[in-house]
């Protein structure tokens, strides 16, 4: 198996936030930021895999601070975890993209392993392992439609939430 250093695919892009990026509140629209994050994730994944990559998932997007028109925004990405055909790249605001490598025919292909060289890289790789487990649990939960939980238990779980449940 081939292994690549994390530093070999680390990517930083910097872009001026233009007036056309503004939302109705005058701040840079979150969709613009997500698009830029997706671009830096693509570049990072492609550098690591040396092949075409696609976005599979985006997890944990948190907009911690507004981005102003006129700001120079730098987005940094690194491959933090790899599976067989996917990798996880961490971005500004702790957003994680899962990218998949594909060949010219659109078929999934294996990605190189990661050569972990620092404690930070080890911790991020292990975070990736946990995120992969959580993503699988989330998919199972969403497919279950919570049918394994009684209506009474569902109602009880909503007791401290801001909702009104009709009696049926």
Image (spheres, rainbow, N blue to C red):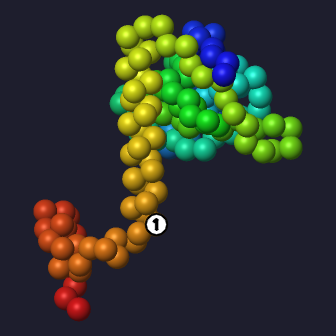
**Quadrant of res 152:** bottom left
Q: Nearer the viewer, residue 25 or 107?
A: 107
Q: Which residue is mark 1?
A: 143
Q: Residue furthest bottom?
A: 168
Q: Nearer the viewer, residue 150 or 109?
A: 109
Disc 1 crowd rating (10 Å Cα; few below 14, some 14-19, many 20+) is: few
How far across and down, in percent of the image, does residue 119 sit? 38, 11
Query: Where residue 161 sits in the image (x, y, percent)?
Result: 18, 63
**Which residue sits at x=40%, y=71%?**
145
- Total tally of numbered discs in the picture: 1
| Residue farthest toward the front in the current orientation of the protein | 1
Residue 16 on image: x %, y %: 61, 19
Residue name at image x 73 percent, y 37 percent: 109
Where in the figure is residue 106, as x and y percent of width and height? 81, 44
Answer above or below: position of 61 versus 155.
Answer: above
* Residue 59 visible, this angle: yes
- Residue 167 vs residue 121: left or right? left
Q: Quadrant of the C terminus?
A: bottom left
Any part of residue 14 in sight: no
Secondary structure of the residue carrying numbered label 1 = helix
* 49 relative to 60, above or below: above
Residue 145 drawn above or below residue 133: below
Residue at screen point 55% across, 13% down: 115
Q: Residue furthest right?
A: 105
Q: Is residue 35 left or right of 96 when viewed as pictured?
A: right
Q: Residue at x 22, y 85 (%)?
A: 166
């Amino acid at each position: 198996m081939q292994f690549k250093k994390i530093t070999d695919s680390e990517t930083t892009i910097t872009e001026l936030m233009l007036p056309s990026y503004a939302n109705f509140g005058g701040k840079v629209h979150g969709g613009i930021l997500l698009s830029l994050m997706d671009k830096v994730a693509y570049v990072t994944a492609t550098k690591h895999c040396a092949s075409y990559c696609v976005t599979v998932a985006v997890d944990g997007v948190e907009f911690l601070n507004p981005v102003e028109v006129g700001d120079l925004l730098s987005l940094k990405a690194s491959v933090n975890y790899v599976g067989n055909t996917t990798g996880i790249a961490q971005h500004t605001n702790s957003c994680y993209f899962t990218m998949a490598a594909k060949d010219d025919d659109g078929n999934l292909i294996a990605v190189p392993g990661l050569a972990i060289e620092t404690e930070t890289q080890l911790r991020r790789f292990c975070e990736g392992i946990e995120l992969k487990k959580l993503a699988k649990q989330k998919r199972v939960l969403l497919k279950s439609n919570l049918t394994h939980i009684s209506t009474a238990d569902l109602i009880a779980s909503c007791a401290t939430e801001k909702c009104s449940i009709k009696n049926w």
